[in-house]
Image (cartoon, rainbow, N blue to C red):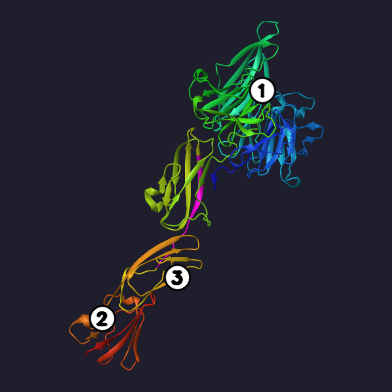
């Protein structure tokens, strides 16, 4: 499959196709369907992260403050001096790894630090840079620090990553749970771009705040965010009874500016009374958007339920009222939801030996299918969280196939229809397709709509094909591909022809390059045939590049005396009989040689033009020899000159 994307130079293919998580658990999407992935030698209960190269080979992984190379050995440089790269984090999914845009082989590991330590360098929001060019490709930490501005803000939630509108850079987004502000840092090929973009008023929602299972997710198109968190409010003053409030907050995100707007809390936020601490029945364990962004899914840690919200319902009240329960069969606690590169949502249940999933997740709740045992983890178990990635999982939004440089197994020949196909990332829903085949001579046929059009190039050459896809969210993706169209073999045959009875005709397609193959109507495979009888003759010529041309000719025979003159009268009154004219034949196809009655050559002309009138010759009999160099045909006879 070929791809060219503009201007998104940062796209890859399989960087998030492998997941290590739980207790020695792992799955891979490299085979098309998710299967168990061995190799995880560690427990990764709360904040697992894994990243692979574009070919789908694991490069590094980790959990909270732990960082391992692809051999599962500790990554060198994980501690600089006496300052650790991160603190022990209670929040699930508080770690994220992303490729640095425009810097192949460099990855950023991001950690939200929720605890204050004596060393100032480990407060706030931490990052580490891994260079895979070190240690023979095993990688090494080459830089570690706090994000700009984050060291003064000590209570961050889990991060998420969203592609910038330029299709290359990444926004790293988190929420300061003390000031209740969103923070968005821009990561580019040159690193962090200054201070974060801050959004929202610096106020807190609640008296007590718990971010143990704080979640932050972005929609696949990156334009929407959802958070889930809870706090405790005393039921009575000075009483050890609290009312727990679990919140779902929706917000809009600008891909170009990094600002968060339209923050709104769903009015069905859950509340439940319990002693001292929260019970887990109404804690949100996982959040996820459907690939088209129309549905929001949430699971509960202790409630054994998955809910679906219709985000197209409109107001927060209408969205809350749209909540539907997805029937499930898993008995254990549901702890996380994660959209996979195949467009399905995967479900982690505590201590389960299987990974579950939801399919058909763009549909309404009644049509969503829950599959409890999708991947057998071979004795390993799920725990609190699954690995995450950017909003698009680094998948190319649009891919064009059946195009590109021609090879022996994929030939595009002039005059034959090219069947184009376009496939979309599971995270892109197309509203329209606009194709330009780069063939202006085709007029209106140079443009087409639809996902899989066809186009016929009448001339050989190189054509630049462009596809513009407008998604249902309004985003526009463009992709281009160069299509090479090869020439057809040329067959140099005359039109249907009549030959003199008793003659012969050498039929050949004309000069062809080495490696050309032939197939005649009788099954023979020689480069030419000698015709001695009337009939229809057909040849199929295939060039070394695989392009084929077919031609057919009808050959008939007639008595030549009725065609060629046997007397000419150069001095007569009838101009039609004054010259030796080849009636019924194309004279220029023939070479003429004339002999007198003693056998001496008296005239020779290539590409005869019907002009011989016996000038300078006496009356008498003359003998002619006609030769067709193209067909090899030879004609002999006599003509009388009367003066």
Magenta stretch holds residue 483: yes
Secondary structure found at label 2:
helix
Rounded to the nearest angstrom, the CA distance separating label 1 from label 2 is 104 Å
Q: Tell me residue 289's x, y (percent).
A: 56, 28
Residues in magenta? Answer: 477-491
Q: Main secondary structure of the magenta part?
A: strand
Query: How many angstroms separate mark 3 from mark 1 (CA)?
Result: 77 Å
Position of residue 339 measured from the top left corner of the image (x, y, whole percent): 59, 32
Eyeballing the image, is 609 above or below 599?
above
> Which residue in the protein does label 2 denote?
561
Q: Quadrant of residue 132?
A: top right
User: Residue 213 bears which disc, if any?
Assistant: 1
Q: Is residue 188 left or right of residue 602?
A: right
In-front residue for pair 636/6? 636
Q: Secondary structure at mark 1?
A: strand
Nearer-the-camera pick, 443 or 303: 303
- What number is the disc on residue 547? none
Residue lying farthest to the bottom in this orientation: 598
* Quarter of the rendering containing residue 140: top right
- Upstream in the sequence, badge 3 or badge 1? 1
The secondary element bearing badge 3 is classed as loop
Mark 3 near mark 2, Cβ–Cβ under 8 Å? no
Q: Position of residue 605 (x, y in %)?
A: 35, 82
Regarding residue 19, the answer to whether it shows in the image is: no
Q: Nearer the viewer, mark 3 or mark 1?
A: 3
């Amino acid at each position: 499959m070929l791809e060219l994307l503009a201007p998104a130079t940062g796209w890859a293919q399989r960087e998030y196709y492998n997941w290590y998580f739980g207790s020695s658990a792992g799955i891979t999407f490299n085979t098309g369907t998710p299967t168990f992935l061995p190799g995880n030698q560690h427990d990764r209960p709360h904040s697992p992260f894994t990243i692979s190269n574009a070919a789908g080979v694991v490069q590094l992984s980790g959990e909270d403050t732990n960082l391992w190379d692809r051999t599962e050995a500790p990554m060198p440089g994980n501690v600089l001096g006496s300052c650790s790269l991160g603190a022990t984090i209670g929040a699930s999914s508080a770690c994220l790894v992303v490729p640095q845009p425009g810097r192949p082989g460099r990855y950023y590991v991001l950690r939200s630090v929720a605890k204050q330590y004596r060393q100032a360098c480990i407060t706030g929001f931490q990052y580490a840079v891994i260079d895979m060019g070190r240690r023979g490709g095993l990688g090494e930490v080459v830089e570690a620090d706090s994000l700009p501005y984050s060291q003064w803000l000590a209570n961050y939630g889990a991060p998420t990553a969203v592609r910038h509108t330029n299709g290359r850079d990444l926004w790293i987004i988190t929420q300061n749970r003390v000031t209740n502000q969103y923070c968005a840092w821009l990561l580019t090929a040159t690193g962090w771009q200054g201070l974060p973009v801050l959004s929202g008023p610096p106020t807190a929602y609640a008296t007590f705040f718990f971010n143990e299972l704080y979640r932050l997710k972005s929609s696949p198109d990156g334009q929407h965010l959802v958070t889930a968190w809870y706090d405790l409010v005393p039921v009575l003053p000075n009483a050890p009874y609290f009312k727990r409030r679990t919140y779902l907050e929706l917000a809009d995100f600008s891909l170009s500016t990094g600002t968060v707007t339209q923050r709104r809390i769903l009015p069905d936020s859950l509340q439940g009374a319990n002693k001292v601490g929260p019970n887990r029945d109404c804690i949100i364990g996982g959040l996820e958007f459907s690939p088209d962004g129309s549905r929001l899914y949430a699971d509960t840690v202790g409630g054994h339920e998955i809910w679906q919200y219709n985000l197209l319902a409109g107001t927060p009240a209408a969205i809350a009222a749209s909540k539907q329960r997805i029937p499930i069969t898993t008995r254990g606690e549901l702890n996380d939801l994660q959209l996979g590169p195949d467009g399905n949502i995967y479900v982690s249940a505590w201590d389960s030996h299987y990974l579950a999933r939801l399919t058909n997740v763009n549909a309404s709740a009644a049509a969503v299918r829950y599959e409890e045992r999708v991947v057998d983890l071979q004795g390993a178990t799920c725990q609190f969280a699954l690995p995450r990635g950017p909003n698009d999982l680094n998948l190319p939004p649009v891919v064009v196939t059946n195009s590109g440089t021609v090879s022996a197994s994929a030939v595009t020949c002039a005059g034959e229809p090219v069947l184009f196909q376009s496939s979309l990332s599971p995270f892109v829903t197309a509203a329209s397709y606009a194709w330009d085949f780069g063939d202006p001579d085709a007029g209106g046929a140079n443009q087409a709509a639809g996902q899989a059009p066809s186009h016929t190039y009448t001339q050989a050459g190189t054509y630049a094909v462009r596809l513009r896809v407008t998604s249902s969210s309004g985003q526009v993706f463009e992709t281009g591909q160069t299509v090479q169209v090869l020439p057809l073999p040329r067959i140099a045959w005359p039109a249907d022809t009549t030959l003199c009875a008793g003659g012969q005709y050498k039929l050949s397609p004309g000069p062809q390059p080495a490696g050309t193959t032939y197939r005649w109507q009788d099954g023979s495979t020689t480069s030419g045939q000698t015709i001695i009888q009337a009939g229809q003759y057909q040849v199929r010529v295939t060039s070394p590049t695989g392009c084929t041309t077919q031609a057919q000719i009808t050959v008939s025979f007639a008595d030549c005396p009725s065609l060629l003159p046997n007397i000419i009268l150069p001095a007569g009154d009838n101009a039609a009989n004054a010259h030796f004219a080849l009636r019924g034949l194309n004279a220029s196809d023939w070479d003429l040689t004339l002999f007198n009655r003693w056998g001496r050559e008296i005239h020779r002309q290539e590409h005869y033009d019907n002009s011989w009138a016996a000038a300078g010759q006496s009356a008498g009999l003359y003998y002619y020899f006609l030769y067709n160099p193209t067909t090899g045909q030879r004609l002999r006879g006599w003509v009388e000159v009367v003066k």
